[in-house]
Image (tube, rainbow, N blue to C red):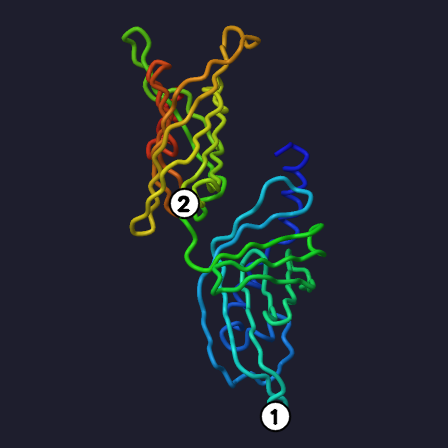
Amino acid sequence: MKKSNIKLFSLLFAAFTMTATMVSCGNDDNKSNPETNAGGTGEDISNYKTHRTLPAWSTISFSYIDEPMYDSGIKLETKYGYNKVNGTTISEYDSLFFFSSVWGTGKFDMLKHTGVMLVAGHGKEAKSYDASVTGSIDEGKVVITIPGMMGGTTINLMPGDAPFGLVISKTYTVNTYSDFAVAGREFNKYQPTQNEKVVITPSETDSYLKANIAFTSTAQTSWGVFDFQSVEVTEADDIYTITGEGKCTMANPRDPSATPNVYTATISGTITGDKLVGTITVPEVHGVTIYLNPDDFDTVVNSGK
């Protein structure tokens, strides 16, 4: 993504991020009357034929931003039955209700293929957007199109638990140091650097089950730019393990104008909540290892190395 697009994307995302207050209130209200919270009509819909609640995940794309967003924590509710007014049945209905901590709430008439999204952010009053909908839960995909949101927004909903590559998709802040050896001399716990960024995105070519990982070293003597594609992701007890191989593009510190060298690199680690702990190694460059969020980082920083 171009730098200008990154800035624009950040501003737009911030403008539409849900506030914590709305989310917490919305969760309680949704259990009792999600229709009202999603912009419903307040009709009596107690005559259900089927009522399901299930998790879902989505990719979200915009008309003028190159890269998509992802949302792994969506809840869907489906309701089939009859609308009643004053005890009289007036029509059959097939409704889908959408709840997201990022995008708000939505109510969709699956028979008419129309709906409304209700979105709020930064304490502002919630704003509703007309939307259209195609697909169905039974087909395994629902596409929500919102022309008036952020220049045109498309939410591709997939029912079920999110694939691991998408669940861990975010930018992680890491503290790092490295070690390596030259001609038999070991440099232990070298160049401690704070607040570096590791960017993880889901791999679309692997059905989002695997992840792509990008890291640019900002150490005083940079270790270069790292790119890992289709990294394996497994999970146990809410801890995600990553392992993969990629490349390191490293400039020549003695001649920055020279063509950078490209080396094989490996990454391994674990993700628990918002914390990534692991290592990146470049065997061809003195066997250098970059430690991500090591337990003794503060000790190393205070040692003055």
In the image, 2 versus 80, the foreground residue is 80
Looking at the image, is 45 positioned above or below residue 303?
A: below
Q: Residue at x 29, y 9 (%)?
A: 185
Q: Which one is nearer the viewer's eye here, 132 or 36?
A: 132
102 relative to 172 in the view: left or right: right
Q: Residues within 10 Å of mark 1 (few under 14, many from 20)?
A: few
Structural distance between the alpha carbons of marks 1 and 2: 48 Å
Which secondary structure, mark 2?
Answer: loop
The total number of labels drawn is 2
Quadrant where the C terminus sits is top left
Give the label on residue 218, or none.
none
Q: Residue at x 49, y 82 (%)?
A: 48
Do labels 1 and 2 touch, CB within 8 Å? no
Asked whether 26 or 60 is in front, the reply is 60
Quadrant for residue 17, please give it: bottom right
Residue 175 placement, left or right of 38:
left
**Left or right: 53, with 127 as reference point:** left
Residue 260 image position (x, y, % from top left): 51, 13
User: What is the residue that sits farthest to the left in this orientation?
Assistant: 184
Q: Which residue is mark 1?
A: 88
Rendering coords of residue 147 (x, y %): 70, 56
Crowd rating for badge 2 (residues with CA inside 10 Å; few <14, some 14–19, many 20+):
many
Indicate the position of residue 136 as horizontal and vertical percent values.
53, 64
Q: Residue at x 46, y 78 (%)?
A: 50
Q: Amino acid at mark 2?
A: Leu
The residue under label 2 is: 209
Please state the horizontal and vertical placement of residue 65, each as a whole percent of the image: 65, 42
The kind of secondary structure element at disc 1 is strand
